[in-house]
Image (cartoon, helix red, strand yellow):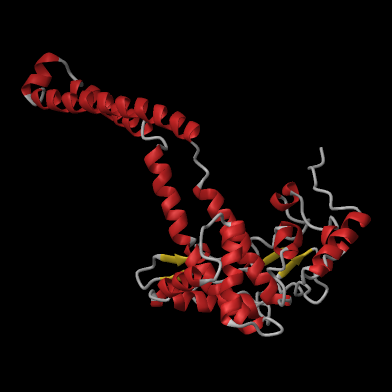
Amino acid sequence: MNPSRQYGPSVEELKALNEKRREQGLPEIRPSMFEQVGLTTDENEMPPVGANPWHDPRYMTPAFLSQKGELLCAPIPRVHVRQMVNPELFMTGFLQGLSGKPLMTVCKFCEEIGKLEMAKDDSDDSYRAVQADHSHLLARTRETVKAVRERLIQVKAEYNGLRESLLRRGLGEAFDRAIAALERLESAAKTFTVGDSERTMKAILDVNWPFERPSVAYALRRIFENHSAPPMKVSDILRRIASFENRFLRANVSDDGTSVAREISRFKQDAERVRIMDALLENFLTAEWYVWPPVTNPDLKPPAKPPEDGTGPEASPQPGQ
């Protein structure tokens, strides 16, 4: 069964839409934007034969580790699939002035922050209710088993030495087997709970901090400020980012960009994250990207396969470099 696709407007509908956009001073929408040249959901899960760019080290940003070895920022794939980009980003003019790697970098940030916002709202009330009921039963099981296990340990202590030999040989081994079985049962009852789910989600969000709103606002401002053609004023950039947050992230920030400016200011207070973000942007804007399919952006083609020994200019960067 082929996965369903969305179909773009007809030639007449697109012509009428472009006439209205010209009147509003917005760029025209190219027909090629609606061509089905990207990946379907199934194709995304099963990359093209002979290639897996989502895990290919040639197209991954390096991971960042603290001096203690803690993961500060996970590797991020530099993979650009036009169909995976929200078409409204193009239609609203948000990406106007960008091309090449700066354009793909902005698309990457917009795509990832959208996923992150969806993940935050992923647990609805009914799902949490099912988990809560399940967790309640598991908690009661753990309490009961723990009480029995602790009582057996106390009783076993009384059957030592002469008492065990007089009453029954091997009684201590039987106690040990029973206690070990109860330990396994108690451990098995520690299944994924609501609390575990929330802690895991928090850990995921902590590692994905580059795609939180203040981080993304900082990144977008830097890219638009340094790579848009013609160059944009800072005030216009802030207003454009505010429009993006309100429309695509369901935020409620001021249209004049003052709220976005405060977001960026808060982000810049963390010098370590600013350092990492600057390095990420440098990697995004200078390293190779995998563009699937290549015709989506004819100016950027996937690099040739590196030598088998891993040497040469296409060798992947090492984590932390």
Q: Residue at the far right: name it.
A: 12
List the single residue furthest toward the left.
Answer: 162
Residue 245, above or below 273? above
171 with respect to 111 (left or right): left
Residue positioned 67% across, 76% down in the render = 102
Q: Exactly how many numbered labels are in the figure?
A: 0
Decide if residue 272 is on the left or right side of residue 179. right
Say left or right for 62 vs 293.
left
Outermost residue to the front: 23
Answer left or right for 258 relative to 178. Answer: right
- Quarter holding residue 107: bottom right
Viewer-closest of 312 and 88:
88
Q: Please state the horizontal and vertical placement of residue 299, each as a whole percent of the image.
A: 80, 77
Q: Quadrant of residue 104?
A: bottom right
Of residue 126 and residue 180, the one placed in the foreground of this image is 126
The relative height of residue 68 versus residue 2 in the rendered view (above or below) is: below
Which residue lies at the image location 57% right of the left edge and 81% below the top edge?
234
The reply to whether residue 76 is visible in this rendering is no
Whether residue 293 is visible here, answered yes or no, is yes
**Quarter of the figure with the N terminus:** top right
* Residue at the image point whose x is 7% and y is 20% from the top: 163
Taking 256 as reference, is 250 above or below it? above
Residue ID at (77%, 72%)? 25
Instruction: Give the image location of residue 80, x and y in percent.
Output: 71, 65
Give the image location of residue 166, x and y in percent. Answer: 9, 16
> Residue 253: x, y in percent?
51, 62
